[in-house]
């Protein structure tokens, strides 16, 4: 017998929001049937229009608020949450932190079945604005003019934006300057439908501690019209610029950067510091976008590693060596592995840049390289993982369980996969002692966390 849904499309219903989804929508239920509504907050009473129904859940649009949450605030810029990725900007920062901390607690219990793990209060920012040190802004045309900004949700329509409140001001300025220069010179924007035009993206990176700026111009074509004039004007108008780079992406793809990169002016890299460690950052380097909270995150990882100077440490998913070199300050030896060969080259250069001789790096899949190291007799005392959002490969988790390092430090950008992986480690003989949430991306739904995991036999000592 076909189940009759409690609501139908175009119904108007009164609801009380109970929770938020992982992407920040309010969750209401009608006879147990969940309806997801953007802009709804837990505890609020509202009128909602049902706009879509599926077998197990529906979607609604907020029509009227009867009772507001104490955490609801006026949006600083009405357009930014819609187009700038700031899904939580209508929530006070106090409310955002509460939501993210609760999210970590809930997934550890629901997914990880971890009832007794200590979850510390989340570490937020003193000033949760203008924190991003990197922008990759798509370029288009409207009414014959060059525009650059954000895509509307679930579309490829670009909304021209002159400022993002989460970007460092120097980043905002750089994007606008390049847009104005290229627009004045008549550089045509790339059209993804026809695969014609030139300018695809404007990218900017900024060293928070050094004040060094990099501009990357991404084009479909191998050459940029009026390149010398563009460079001349950028240098004149952006005194902090140290590097101007041309990246060529000639493919029909949503991937932003192509394979070919050349320096038009200045240096191939800019520099920045996290704590006392100096990093060289190229156009293609992965580097954390919130330098203030990156130090908070890495300091916590270092604290949980509790290094005395005698330990051998493995850093899986090491990237350009950011966590590895933090660990190398305190460890006897650090071994880093990363699947991207260019990142490993950057890691080696960064080790040399800082004079670290106790850090070695190898390119390859962590789940393949670390078992090889284990077979060769490299039995780490501490193992650190900082995987992508999909979490650790199960083969790597099995290797950790077989290798039995005394401590594992798990740096996570996705609480759900963290909880899943902690369950596997717990079933394999480990104990999750504590978890520290860190707000790396204010006004978005993303939350990072660091977990301290100890071998059961070490707990019992």
Image (cartoon, rainbow, N blue to C red):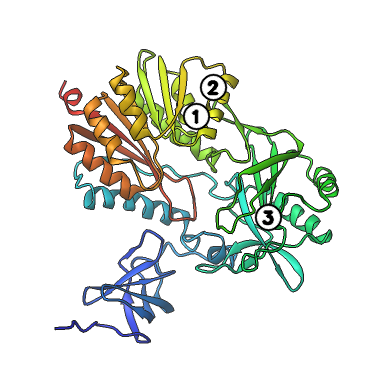
Q: Position of residue 14 (x, y in %)?
A: 33, 81
Q: Residues within 10 Å of mark 2 (few under 14, many from 20)?
A: many
- In the drawing, what numbered circle is on residue 351? 2
Mark 3 or 2 closer to N-term? 3
Of 326 and 1, the residue lying toward us: 1
Provide the residue designation for mark 3.
220
Of 138 and 36, the residue lying toward us: 138
Q: In the picture, residue 7 is in which quadrant?
A: bottom left
Q: Where is residue 221 in the image (x, y as percent from the top left)?
A: 71, 53
Q: Residues within 10 Å of mark 1 (few under 14, many from 20)?
A: many
Q: Which residue is drawn at 81% across and 42% down?
A: 235
Q: Position of residue 19 (x, y in %)?
A: 32, 64
Q: Which of marks 1 and 3 is in front?
A: 3
> Is the residue under label 2 in contact with that under label 1 (CB below 8 Å)?
yes
Quadrant the N terminus occupies? bottom left
Position of 180 relative to 427 (above/below): below
Of 105 and 268, the residue lying toward us: 268
> Is the residue under label 2 in contact with that under label 3 (CB below 8 Å)?
no
């Amino acid at each position: 017998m076909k189940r009759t849904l409690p609501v139908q499309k175009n119904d108007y219903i009164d609801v009380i929001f109970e929770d938020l989804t992982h992407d920040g929508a309010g969750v209401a239920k009608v006879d147990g049937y969940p309806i997801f509504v953007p802009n709804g907050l837990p505890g609020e009473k509202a009128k909602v229009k049902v706009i879509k129904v599926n077998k197990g859940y529906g979607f609604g649009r907020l029509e009227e608020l009867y009772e507001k949450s104490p955490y609801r605030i006026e949006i600083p810029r009405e357009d930014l949450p819609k187009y700038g990725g700031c899904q939580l900007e209508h929530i006070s920062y106090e409310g955002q932190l509460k939501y993210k901390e609760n999210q970590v607690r809930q997934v550890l219990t629901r997914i990880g079945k971890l009832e007794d793990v200590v979850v510390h209060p989340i570490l937020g920012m003193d000033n949760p604005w203008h924190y991003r040190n990197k922008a990759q802004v798509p370029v288009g045309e409207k009414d014959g003019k060059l525009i650059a900004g954000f895509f509307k949700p679930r579309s490829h329509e670009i909304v021209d934006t002159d400022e993002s409140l989460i970007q460092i001001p120097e980043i905002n300025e750089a994007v606008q300057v390049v847009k104005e220069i290229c627009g004045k010179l008549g550089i045509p924007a790339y059209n993804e439908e026809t695969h014609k035009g030139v300018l695809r993206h404007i990218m900017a990176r900024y060293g928070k501690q050094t004040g060094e700026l990099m501009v990357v111009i991404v084009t479909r074509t191998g050459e940029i019209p009026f390149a010398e004039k563009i460079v001349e004007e950028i240098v004149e108008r952006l005194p902090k610029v140290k590097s101007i780079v041309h990246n060529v992406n000639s493919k029909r793809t949503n991937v932003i950067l192509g394979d070919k990169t050349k320096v038009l002016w200045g240096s191939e890299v800019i520099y920045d510091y996290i704590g006392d460690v100096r990093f060289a950052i190229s156009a293609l380097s992965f580097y954390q976008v919130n330098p203030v909270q990156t130090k908070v995150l890495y300091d916590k990882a270092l604290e949980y590693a509790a290094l005395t100077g005698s330990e051998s440490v493995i850093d899986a998913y090491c990237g350009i060596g950011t966590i590895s070199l933090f660990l190398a300050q305190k460890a006897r030896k650090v071994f880093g592995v990363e699947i991207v060969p260019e990142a490993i080259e950057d890691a080696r250069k960064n080790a040399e840049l800082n004079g670290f001789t106790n850090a070695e790096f190898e390119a390859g899949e962590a789940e393949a390289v670390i078992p090889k190291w284990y077979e060769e007799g490299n039995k780490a005392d501490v193992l650190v993982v900082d995987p992508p959002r999909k979490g650790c490969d199960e083969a790597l988790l099995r290797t950790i369980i077989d290798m039995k390092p005394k401590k594992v430090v798990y740096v996570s950008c996705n609480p759900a996969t963290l909880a899943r992986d902690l369950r596997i480690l717990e079933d394999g003989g480990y104990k999750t002692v504590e978890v520290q949430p860190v707000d790396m991306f204010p006004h978005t739904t993303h939350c990072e966390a660091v977990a301290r995991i100890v071998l059961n036999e070490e707990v019992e000592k």
